[in-house]
Image (cartoon, helix red, strand yellow):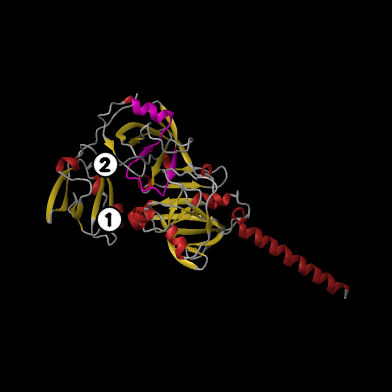
Amino acid sequence: MELNMKNVLKFIYLIAAFACFHVAYAQDTFVDITIPHNDFNATPVVDVYIGDKGPYIFAVDTGASSSSITKQLADEIGLQYVEPPTKILTVKDVSSIEITNQVDIYISDKKVHRKTRLHIADFEHELLTKAVGILGVSEMLGGTLVNVPTQKKLILSLPLTNPICDSENELSFCYGAFKKTKTINFSLGSHNGVLLIDTGYSGHTNLVMFKSHETNNIWNQYPDDIQLLNLKGISNLPLKTFRTNDFTYNNKDCSADIIIRNPMDASPLFSELTGIVGWNIISNEDFTIDFKEGGGIDFPNNNCPFKKENTLGLKGVYSSADFSLLFIKNLVFDSAATKAGLKEGDQIEKIILADGNVITKFDHTLFNYNDQHVYAPVGSKVTYFVRRDGVLKPFIITAEGVPVLELD
């Protein structure tokens, strides 16, 4: 009887040890989620369930440390929310409206579970990506994001559980902290700063410089005859833009398109940030973002992610919901496109690329596999068919090198 009892106790001990091992192992187990980042204007998106409802399309945003949804979706699924005690600033001049109580969200066919609070905010992602939410990856703690452009894969590796976001404390990390996002150091001529890698920003410009002491100096370094842009999502005032070969990252000289924010712009900004590198700039480069404590951003082989030269002059385009039309949002001043007669707001129905390919469906194929509509070889010709006043008219653009300015 005594022997049997010892065996029973031994068995119980083994079961308990196995359970503890299983729990510890589960907490360290990561799930890989392949994100269909070629969809919807090349912005990474993933399926997210809120409770038992969904899936809903969320933009995967490494530049956001908390997740958010549109107010329309919150009302549609009956989420309860409250007014925030203070205004919450974002990179744009937008504030969150309300914050929900803790809710359960499940990511990518319910592979990963999180208990978190959601910001309810006005944002433009749904216009570009059909998304009704933003998945702030920085909030997921302990994961990595790997881009494998040769295989057209973006892999989000997350731990199965995140106990920090199970906290009932309203000041917990479930609300997010901007400092948890990942940044890289850079130099621009004699100026230095920190850039945020932001997959949630489609970024047809290589580099967006925000208001800071350094960018004020750069702004004042050049006269006002530099090209001015009007980008309402970034600033209510015109911005200066130019291309330079003085951009350095990883001790590698790069060329970059620079947008400088007007020092008179009073929009709120995060003081530690100098600018943002958008998804379109790094989508064709191998990189890994490690969100663990002390982790960072790795570009293997010391690559420069700021290579492509905009030879036609299209800075921003977006497609219609059915991908049958392409609209020009922004053009480079005095570029090949403007010289050929294209205008902001033009409605494009067909493109004949320099290699002879004909594009009539403006989905991810245009933005990923046939990017010669922006980066055509210098000297080659691209034809845009624009409908104006009911007439379909061809505009032939000869790709040309972009003027380069050197900084002091």
Q: Which residue is rendered at x = 35% and y = 53% of the image?
A: 42
Q: Secondary structure at mark 2?
A: loop
Q: Which mark is residue 395?
A: none
Disc 2: which residue: 310
* Marked residue nearer the N-terminal end (1 or 2): 2
Q: Is residue 212 highlighted in magenta?
A: yes
**Residue 61 at x, y percent in the picture:** 44, 50
**Residue 31 at x, y percent in the picture:** 52, 59
Give the answer, above or below, for where 258 lies relative to 78: above
Q: Which residue is rendered at x = 34% and y = 26% of the image?
A: 220
The 10 Å Cα crowd at callout 1, few under 14, some 14 to 19, many 20 or more, is: many
Q: Which residue is rendered at x = 46% and y = 66% of the image?
A: 54
The quadrant in which residue 244 appears is top left
User: Identity of the amino acid at label 1?
Assistant: Ser
* Frontmost residue, 231 versus 400: 231
Query: Is residue 336 in view from this perspective?
Result: yes
User: Identity of the amino acid at label 2?
Assistant: Asn
Which quadrant: the N terminus? bottom right
Give the answer, above or below, for where 164 lies relative to 209: below
* Frontmost residue, 270 versus 241: 270
Q: Return the residue found at the far right.
A: 2
Residue stretch rendered in magenta on the structure:
195-220
Which quadrant: the C terminus? top left
Disc 1: which residue: 319
